[in-house]
Amino acid sequence: MNNDQLRDQIHKTAKLISKAGKVVVFTGAGVSTESGIPDFRSPGGLWSKFDPDDFTIDRFLYSPETRKKQWKFLLDEGSFAQARPNAAHNAIAWLETIGKLNCVITQNVDDLHQKAGNSPERVYELHGNMKWLKCLDCLERYPLEDLLGRFRGTEEVPACIRCQGILKPDVIFFGESLPTQTLKDATYAASNCDLLIVIGSSLVVYPAAYIPLYAKGGGAKLVIINKTETSYDANADVVIHGGAGEVMSGIVAVLQKMDVSCA
């Protein structure tokens, strides 16, 4: 995609946003990588450092060694706690401030949409949030950052302070179902929006990847912003192959010139 094509597609997207009453944004790992958070499947991603089997719920429940590896992962991948929102997150948050954004549906677990300023009640986290550890017995939740500070530099794997139960990152492991109510709310929002903007997702992980189908089935326009092609590109009204931050910043700049707002 050359500069003229990119500029044209950015303007088309801005016009779709200006006309839409309800905009839903669906985000994947391509948004978070620009904040320094590695994705899973790309060369050099997390699967090149860790065994995917250690992220299954059965292995986590029944193997103390796996839980130790998980805790080491949380200590080593401190980028989750230290990461800051990038231009794409800020642009999505800005869409909320001008009254265009209905909600964000995200596959990411890094809390960066909330850090950028999106209202927590408008962020549907399909795969959970790494910000928290949850006790599997009494369901008490602990901020990850607090426990990282307390246990860093030790070999100890933290347990629930209240009941000594197993603490699990409050994210969806392989073998677990997506949170029922969150998925229901996200599906409803996608099915009833005027415009769905997919940003930074290859749309290969199901059932989350059904979200564009729900939107198109409800009559919404579909924009896909991703560095590589997706299997949904042929169904999209606009496809932009580019970085999330650059493209979203360009869209915001056009909308600001158009003085778009319904707030």
Image (cartoon, grey):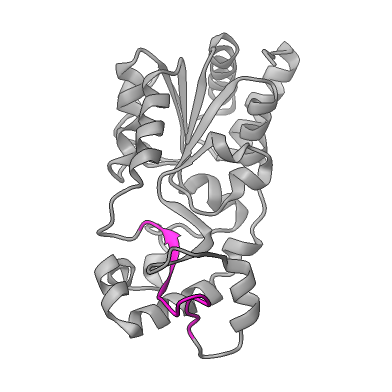
Q: Quadrant of residue 49?
A: bottom left
Instruction: State the residue at coordinates (60%, 22%).
Output: 7
Instruction: State the residue at coordinates (49%, 46%).
Output: 30
The percent position of residue 57, horizontal first and vertical second, equals: 29, 66
The percent position of residue 60, horizontal first and vertical second, equals: 32, 73
- Looking at the image, which is closer to me, 232 or 56? 56
Farthest residue toward the bottom? 155
Farthest residue toward the top? 19
Instruction: State the residue at coordinates (45%, 77%).
Output: 163
Q: Is residue 161 magenta?
A: yes
Residue 201 can be seen, yes or no: yes
Q: Which residues make up the magenta segment?
A: 157-172
Residue 203 can be seen, yes or no: no
Whether 158 is drawn above or below 96: the answer is: below
Is 32 positioned to the left or the right of 136 in the image? right
The percent position of residue 67, horizontal first and vertical second, equals: 38, 78
Secondary structure mainly formed by the magenta segment: loop
Whether 174 is drawn above or below 75: the answer is: above
Whether 6 is drawn above or below 119: the answer is: above
The mark total stands at 0
- Looking at the image, which is closer to me, 127 or 141? 141
Q: Is residue 3 magenta?
A: no
Q: Quadrant of residue 119?
A: top right
Instruction: State the residue at coordinates (35%, 34%).
Output: 184
Image quadrant holding the C terminus, namely: top right
- Looking at the image, which is closer to me, 225 or 61? 61
